Amino acid sequence: MSADLRIGIAGTGAIGKTHIERINTRLRGGKVVAATDASPTFGKATAEQYNLEFFPDCDSLVASKKIDALIVTAADDDHERFVTSALKANLPVFCEKPLAPTADACKRIIDLETSIGKRLVQVGFMRRYDPGYRELKRLVDSGEFGAPLMLHCAHRNFSVADNYTTPMAITSTLIHEIDVLRWLVGEDYATVEIQQTRPRQSARSANHDPHKRQRHTHGRRSTRDKPHRLRHPVRSLLRRRILETARTPHRPAPPPRATRNANLPRLVGTFRRSVQY
């Protein structure tokens, strides 16, 4: 093995290019050296742009013995195939979310990894590493503002790709909340409810827009997701805020209102940092 970790990229679209540029220009200890893509023409052009060796498919990339780890940034439907190829070669693999678009496919990946006897797969859930989220987690754990009762989440995009369908609102968008909110409040989900209204006239035929998701944790906290506007004329924005807090009996009485208000600028700053990508 060379001094730097030799990394292969499966999928050379926008996210794949972002990983290549970040690893090869801003990080130390690893270097992207090879790539593959479902579109040979596009993949070869990207490989030439970044001086990478191109392989016609993921199996040949993995079998080449020229990489020590694989990053999967391909289309969701290809995730299972590429991750499985890496696991069979005993290679560590980082897969962008979702791990796979169906529960059965995810289960097959987990079963294969379990049979190997060690953890080799990491999914790209990055929000718990974001400074804004980490500060919010600290505030929630400290109880400084009480215990969270309800979390209100909103995700709006200016537009989405033409191949975006209603199930992708769960597997490609809500999946971030599914991951990070469990970590934020330290509880698992007990129930999940999806509510769909009559679609808007401007909604595309492949999408049911809007719809609302509501979940409750075992601690009876409520999580609501605002109607998902698949085409919303505002800049990309993700906001996370605690709507209600409650003081449990073992906590001391809250300080006077003037003192509590003094804390608000710091809390607002935390929320603002959490949406700046």
Image: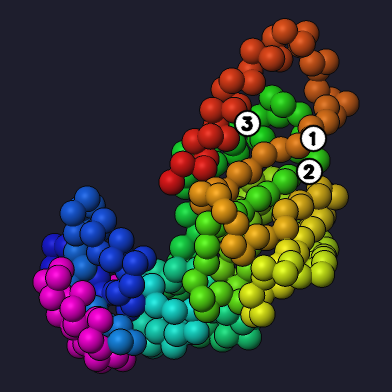
Tell which of 111 and 62 is nearer to you: 62
Question: What residue is at 49 percent from the left and 71 percent from the top?
Answer: 161
- Distance of label 3 from label 1 (alpha carbons): 14 Å
**Which amino acid type corresponds to the residue marked 3 in the rendered image?**
Leu
Residue at disc 3, secondary structure:
helix
Q: Is residue 241 above or below residue 214?
A: above
In this picture, residue 62 sits left or right of residue 1? right
Q: Nearer the N terminus, badge 3 or badge 1? A: 3
Residue to which mark 2 is pinned: 150
Q: Nearer the viewer, mark 3 or mark 2?
A: 2
Residue at disc 2, secondary structure:
strand
Residue to which mark 3 is pinned: 139
**Which amino acid type corresponds to the residue marked 1 in the rendered image?**
Glu
Question: What residue is at 66 percent from the left and 35 percent from the top?
Answer: 141
Range of residues picked out in magenta: 40-69
Q: How busy is the neighbourhood of tag 3: few (under 14 within 10 Å), some, or many (20 plus)?
A: some
Q: How busy is the neighbourhood of tag 1: few (under 14 within 10 Å), some, or many (20 plus)?
A: few
- Distance of label 1 from label 2 (alpha carbons): 6 Å
**What x and y, as percent, mark residue 24?**
19, 59
